[in-house]
Image (tube, rainbow, N blue to C red):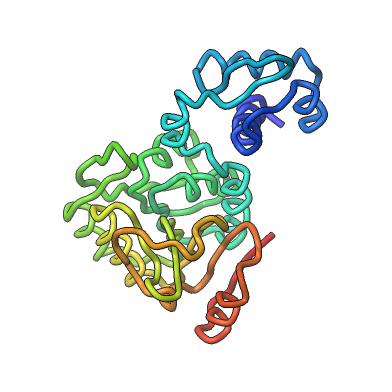
Amino acid sequence: MIKTQRINQIKEYVYEHESVSLDELVEHFGVSKNTIRRDIQQLVDSGVLKKVYGGVSVNHSKLVVFNERKDQNLTKKQEIGRLAAEFVEDGDVIFIDSGTTTLEMLPYIKSKHLTVITNNFDFIYEAKPYPSLTIFSTGGIFERKTNSFVGFQSVEPLQRYNINKAFIASTGISVENGVTNSSPLETEIKNTVVKKSLKVFLLIDDSKFDKSALTTFCSLSDIDYIVTNSKPSEKYNQYALQHQITIVTP
């Protein structure tokens, strides 16, 4: 495991457990205590964690910032990104939505020959070293809260693209309210992409089920694949069966 990945997983592990000992981290991650100490010091210096006797704990004064960095559920997002990437083939024209879950597909598609349409600023930036990815930005207004391009300037170009597969993120889903998002500025983009794509993949972790956000951008029945980290409840399994939706889990 590379250092940056391990540090991100340590952040998530401590966040989930509130407080952990150094010995527990050594055992869980299978590295030396000196390595753990160095990783922990980097997290302490950044303000995410604080030292306690024999270990570390969440620095609650920085908890909001930590959530804004979207490190929560990182391991789940990485697994979802890996699963979704298995459906991407050389020659595909794909759409990568804004968000951190879709971003986690990049390590698994970076060597494929693809045309990628995206409004995800982080994806564009991190995909720069990989020449096999031909990237088209939607353009538009840069929304700092989501690191994405939004607005009618983004929607208009999407009308002209023929997308094989779209990989979409969501704030929450429910049978009653469909697929929802907390940013109204992104809603029209997501709605347009769903309509323009041959296959739509919804990438969500298990915390998003039975949740509804401010706006609905499509019905759950408009989705072809739900890619998630664990099997959803029987209600969603039955709905998927009735509407020919494939649920993909590890």
Rendered position, 93 above or below 110: below
Q: Position of residue 114 (x, y in %)?
A: 48, 53
User: Which residue in the rendered view is the most extreme toward the front?
Assistant: 53
Tell whether 42 sits left or right of 94: right
Number of numbered tags placed on the structure image: 0
Tell whether 113 sits left or right of 198: right
Tell whether 245 sits left or right of 94: right
Q: Position of residue 15 (x, y in %)?
A: 59, 34
Rendered position, 7 above or below 142: above
Rendered position, 66 above or below 131: above
Quadrant where the C terminus sits is bottom right
- Residue drawn 77% across and 31% down? 29
Tell me which corner region of the image, top left, top right, bottom left or bottom right, holds residue 181: bottom left
- Residue drawn 65% across and 60% down? 230
Tell whether 122 sits left or right of 84: left
Q: Position of residue 54 (x, y in %)?
A: 74, 16
- Residue drawn 43% across and 74% down? 220
User: Which residue in the rendered view is the most extreme toward the bottom?
Assistant: 242
Tell me which corner region of the image, top left, top right, bottom left or bottom right, holds residue 160: bottom left
Tell me which corner region of the image, top left, top right, bottom left or bottom right, holds residue 3: top right
Quadrant where the N terminus sits is top right
Q: Nearer the viewer, residue 250 or 121?
A: 250
User: Which residue in the rendered view is the most extreme toward the left?
Assistant: 152
Q: Position of residue 132 (x, y in %)?
A: 50, 45
- Residue drawn 60% across and 35% down? 12
Rendered position, 112 above or below 7: below
